[in-house]
Image (cartoon, coloured by chain):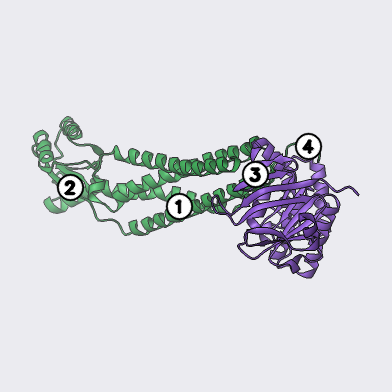
Amino acid sequence: MRRAGPSQPLPSLETSWRRGRLMPEVLVLTLLLATLTPLLAWHGLERSLVATTVTMAVPASTAATDLEGALQALRRAAPVAAVETAPPAAVEELWASLYGADAQAPILLDVRLWPTVTIDAAALDQLATTFLPEAVVEVHVGHLPPAWTTWPLLALWLAIGLTLGVRLRRGLRRFLAAERDALTLLVAFGGKPQRIEALVAKPAERRLTLASAGAALLGGALGLGLVATAYALPLASLASLPWLALPLAVLATASILPFAVRLLARRVLRRRLHLAMA
Amino acid sequence: MERPAPVVRLFDLDVGPKPGLVLVEGIEWEVRGGCIVAVVGPIGSGKSSLLRTLGLLQPPGRGVYEFVGHVTHLANAHLRASLRRRLGLALPDLPWLGAASVRENLALPLKIQETAASEIDQVVGDFLEWLGLGSRAETPASLLSDGERRLLRVARAAVTRPDLLLADEPLAGLDRATTERVRRLLHELARLGTAVVVTAAESAATAGLAHETWKLDDRRLRPADAAALRLAG
């Protein structure tokens, strides 16, 4: 018999995983996806927010406290995202051209609302005029059509997401094949059961943890992308979801995907290990 | 001269590719150390199933397989693992570590057996030179030609100098020079005391290699030459 020596690492799994041509591509694609997802989300969100606007033209003589009261009432009635005043110079110029140089320009307010389930335009109008009887209120409810930039952005996002999914699936299959080969060889050449456990099962667990973290990132991006897509297109039923849906969708996708990957891979590996050592 | 002890003894053994499917039945057989035995038979006659059973990769259907004095079906997981360390398997269904080099693949059985690193380097280096694969030592196994892979398969089985080496058609599809290398390797192993079992489709393929030849015929393992007949008698 040969002399027993110090335990040595096997060249099998770690090297085949490290040497795989998978990692750089996946890294680049993930970075691209991570960059595109917030872009797409912001793009869609902006369109959606702009789409729901209350425009109020208030006489210049309106007291500041009245104005503030009206805005507070609006905030209580509907989720206000932002209040913007129109550029004073532009308004004054327009007013002067209409009513003459001495006419005092009104204050124009654009109140942007977060998308909500329902926006009662008549109620908002009444509310604003209750506090500001002289205000001219115009409520725009509905979505603007998607900007032309939405489509290439969305197409790119989908293409990268799909490519990444395919690459990850291929990587997982390669990982399982490498584990299977190593396990077969370890058993066939007389690896001790506890050594097989140490060499195959434990490193496999570590790699699965890494794979799960990767899948969680991908899942998060996909979840966010789904919500972003709904706002970017916009899909009326999805875009009108309450805001709680966004983190929930992201969280659910990010949790379920790695869990599924891990469960599947663990079951396959454990079954093989059990069969091989029986 | 004293005959070497039997390495393999089979008593009324049935073998087949899976439980319930028997291709060869009632095998009564013995293989001794230092002997090269050929098992010939057509495709589907049960040659590979016999080798897989002898290689402890599948359980026999019925009967008793005794390897180096141990009844294999009574062995627990630890004993079975230690028995496997005394086997050399050159079977086509054993995979390669494709991304690993020729040297790493050849060293794998030694590493599994926890051989000292210095000894692994020396043994593997000697083997590579002897096989003429020295220049390909760092090449990934997946890039080898079919002939080189067959040669490496036998070498990987032989590198631990096992008590029993099982090779499924080791000479099929090899050129003359490689065939000669494999023959020399197997003869050298047998000279050192290893029992070698090889398979072939026809007995001509193992002429000049095997000391005795057996034939799988009509679900039975029968002697096919005078040497085998003498042992069977």
Tag of residue A4: 4
Q: Nearer the viewer, residue A84 or B1?
A: B1
Instruction: Give the answer, above or below, for where B209 lies relative to A210.
Output: below
Say whether disc 4 or disc 2 marks the residue closer to the N-terminus: 4
Q: Name the residue under label 2.
A: A141
Q: What tint does the image give chain A?
A: green
Q: Name the residue under label 1.
A: A165
Q: How far apart are marks 2 and 1 (CA)?
A: 38 Å
Q: Which chain is purple?
A: B
Q: Determine the chain carrying the residue at label 4.
A: A
- In terms of sequence position, does the residue under pointer 2 or pointer 3 come before the other? 2
Q: Along the polypeptide, which appears first: circle 2 or circle 1?
A: 2
Query: Which residue ends up furthest to the front in the rendered image?
Result: B233
Give me the C-alpha separation between circle 1 and circle 4. Answer: 45 Å
For label 4, the SS is loop
SS assignment at label 2: loop
